[in-house]
Amino acid sequence: MTRRRPRWAAALAATALGVTGCGLATSSAAAAPTDEAELREYATDTWASMVAMTDTATGLPSDNIGGDLAPASASAYTSPTNIGGYLWSTVVARDLGLIGGDEARERMTATIGTLETIERHPASGMYFNWYAPSDGRMLTTWPDTGDPVDPFLSSVDNGWLAAALRIVAEAEPALHDRSRALYDSMDFGAFFDPVGKQPTLPTGTNRGGFWVTAPTGNCSVEAPLYNGAAGTVFYTCHHYDTTVSESRIATYLAIADGRIPPSSLYGTFRTMPESCDWSWQEQRPIGTTRQYSGLNVYEGAYQYDELAFVPSWGGSMFEALMPDLLVPEAEWGPHSWGLNHPITVEVQRRHGADAGYGYWGFSPASNPEGGYREYGVDLAGIRADGYLSDTENTDVDIDYTDCPGAEGTNPDPSFGDGVVTPHAAFLALPYATEAAVQNLHAIRHDLGAYGPGGFLDAVAVKSGTVADRYLSLDQSMIMAAIGNHLGDDLLKRYFVDEVLESRLRPAIAAQRFSASWGTPEPEAAGAGTTAPQLADTGAERSAVFGLAGVVLLTLGGVALGSRMRRRRSA
């Protein structure tokens, strides 16, 4: 089953003012060439927002700050992800010549010094999720409201901080030993549940995180620490069980450190299974069952027009492409991420045209109407109600083919005031460079979503309503994307060492997603067909990469069904 473009798509694309090859509006302002100077200007201004958010004494950035960069508008909380993003942004700022080596070293030294002293979980080495930027205190009450905060340790947030520590250790010799010592003390085996899996998955998966005491208002499971350390904690009821997720950074690090088996890459859903029992998912997948070292994996894919791709949970660029800022996924996985990343970008571009927005880039960000929201392309997300792309929350609901009672209720909607998030367009730089730069140029000049700290966090394209603030996480993704583009993948080069590559690259290289730019291959044609493949062998991988001795382990287990998405700033 190939999902055809609905009737509204052709009509909106045809009436757009000035269309490119994929139906996106290109005003005269948007016709600016792809040049280094423009991206350097964006990096300079984005770095200004990072400086404004960061306490010079502690080296900790606030989670967000107002659009005028006024110190009083900075939030009184930060997270491990924010801290990690600030560290790699400092490396980018130095390597692009925005600041000198002495300033960069002083800034990173302050941050590392604080990380050496602030409270964390001793049995895992992990950091808690919320700290005060002013003095590094672990937060037990929420600064904005006074509500209590249950001390929580997030697998994915700690993943981004640990990744940044790897980068600092390689990028700044004066901090190598201190940064590496912090990194080595973080045991990602503490999050990996070897038996907590869905019945249809072949291996264990990571929990979302854990609390040190029983939380109030959140589902938890008390269990001994998975890394074998003494004591029990209260794990989240949910596991990170989808492949296209920002959470895979924690899996990569755990594999690189030898804490969990490389087979963990095969223990997450590409899509849910295609049977009617799973008809709650956004669309019925196509695909095939493949074998990786004896493990059966359903390589499912969703469709957008003639494109087949592996979806994320919500359909956002952040989920799909943030790990690619540090891990050379497309290079190491030419039959998986090397296909899926550029197709994901193309799906986002087409949605911008099909919905009549004229601009594209959809990812969780500040809501122009206030607060925070998860934006994405609904049809590109597994979640039934998706991450939606306009202020009206327009939900696309198509048929789940050939399943009674699963007919679509809104297959052909008219979209409203679309919300684009500039950081999402920056993530597309490696895969649609000219289109991304033109899109960003238009967002800046046509929509006015730009201030003293660079691109403001989000903008509604029809009303022109702008989310007038900067989020540390989103700004750090912009810095990473520009740094990689102008600096020959500089963050990837700092992040990857021989040990990480030897343990991780063969497992990534073995994967073959059911992603395709055109008509699916015969083995994947039709809804729900499967064609078991011969196992990829270690010898085949060794012949390609000269890497041998990778052992993939099979682990059994039981399922825990509930899911919780982690909190991000509001």
Image (cartoon, grey):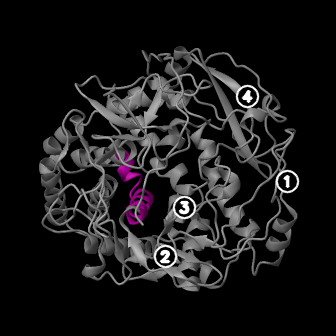
Mark nearer the viewer, 2 or 4: 2
Residue 481: say if magenta. yes
Q: CA distance from mark 2 to mark 1?
A: 35 Å
Say what secondary structure mark 4 lies in. strand
The residue where tag 3 is placed is 374
Question: Would you identify the image quadrant in which residue 281 lies?
Answer: top right
Quadrant of the frame with the N terminus? top right
Q: CA distance from mark 1 to mark 4?
A: 21 Å
Q: Is residue 314 left or right of residue 10?
A: left
Is there any visible trace of residue 516 in the rendered image? no
Say what secondary structure mark 3 lies in. loop
Q: CA distance from mark 1 to mark 3?
A: 26 Å
Residue extent of the magenta highlight: 474-493
Spot occupied by residue 310 in the image (x, y as percentages of width and height): 65, 42
| Label 3: few (<14), some (14–19) or many (≥20) C-alpha neighbours in 10 Å | some
Determine whether 252 is above or below 218 in the image. above
Work out which residue is located at the far front of the displayed protein and give it.
216
Q: Please tell me whether the stretch drawn in magenta is mainly helix, strand or loop.
A: helix
Name the kind of residue labelled 3 in the image. Glu
Q: Earlier in the sequence, mark 1 or mark 3?
A: 1
Q: Is residue 543 left or right of residue 106?
A: right
Question: Would you identify the image quadrant in which residue 40 lies?
Answer: bottom left
Say what secondary structure mark 2 lies in. loop
Spot occupied by residue 288 in the image (x, y as percentages of width and height): 73, 28
Say what secondary structure mark 1 lies in. loop
The residue where tag 4 is placed is 288
The residue where tag 2 is placed is 370
Name the kind of residue labelled 4 in the image. Thr
Residue 150: say if magenta. no
Q: CA distance from mark 3 to mark 2?
A: 13 Å
The label on residue 4 is 1
Q: Is residue 166 left or right of residue 207?
A: left
